[in-house]
Image (tube, grey):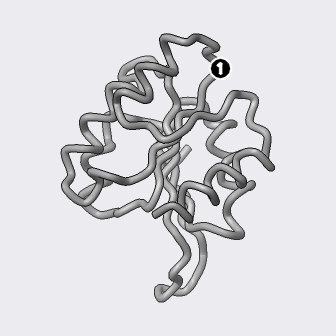
Amino acid sequence: MENTFENEMPVDDNRPVILAIDDVPEILRTVHLVLKDSYKVYTLNDPEKLEELLADLTPDLFLLDYCMPELTGFDLMPIIRSFPEHSETPVIYLTSVRSLDFYNVAQRLGACDYIMKPIDADKLREKIGKHLADE
């Protein structure tokens, strides 16, 4: 599977850009299908390539899987925040973890929200819309 999906839209497309990072291709496909009509959706299934991708892409919002084999979503947060343009970019975690510790750490790292897996399409659109409107 390729690391990014790019919408086939004109270059002057000014829809918000979302970057979803997850090691499970089915999750990335779901996110892309649910959001592609309203947002420019890019996906990455190899979190170790995040820095490289951010050199060329400026997302308006990140969706991060919490639990991945090499780097967790928590590991990715300092990488994202190391880019000055992403010091305040909304980050929403995708997770199946139901733990108060998870929520506390995510919030402390600067996440604005979380979405439980399996992903509910309406909840995903609702939370993204809310956090992009807060920008």
Residue at 62 percent across and 37 percent down: it is 25
The kind of secondary structure element at disc 1 is loop
The quarter holding residue 95 reads: top right
Residue at 37 percent across and 25 percent down: it is 74
State left or right for residue 42 relative to residue 39: left
Instruction: For the C terminus, give its image quadrant.
Output: bottom left
Residue 69 vertical placement versus 36 (above, below): above
Q: Name the residue under label 1.
A: 96
Residue at 52 percent across and 46 percent down: it is 20
Q: Where is residue 12 in the image (x, y as percent from the top left)?
A: 48, 88
State left or right for residue 38 relative to residue 64: right
- Total of numbered circles in the picture? 1
What amino acid is labelled 1 in the image?
A: Ser
Q: Where is residue 115 in the image (x, y as percent from the top left)?
A: 65, 34
Q: Where is residue 26 in the image (x, y as percent from the top left)?
A: 69, 36
State left or right for residue 37 relative to residue 94: right
Residue 101 vertical placement versus 35 (above, below): above
Residue 8 vertical placement versus 45 (above, below): below
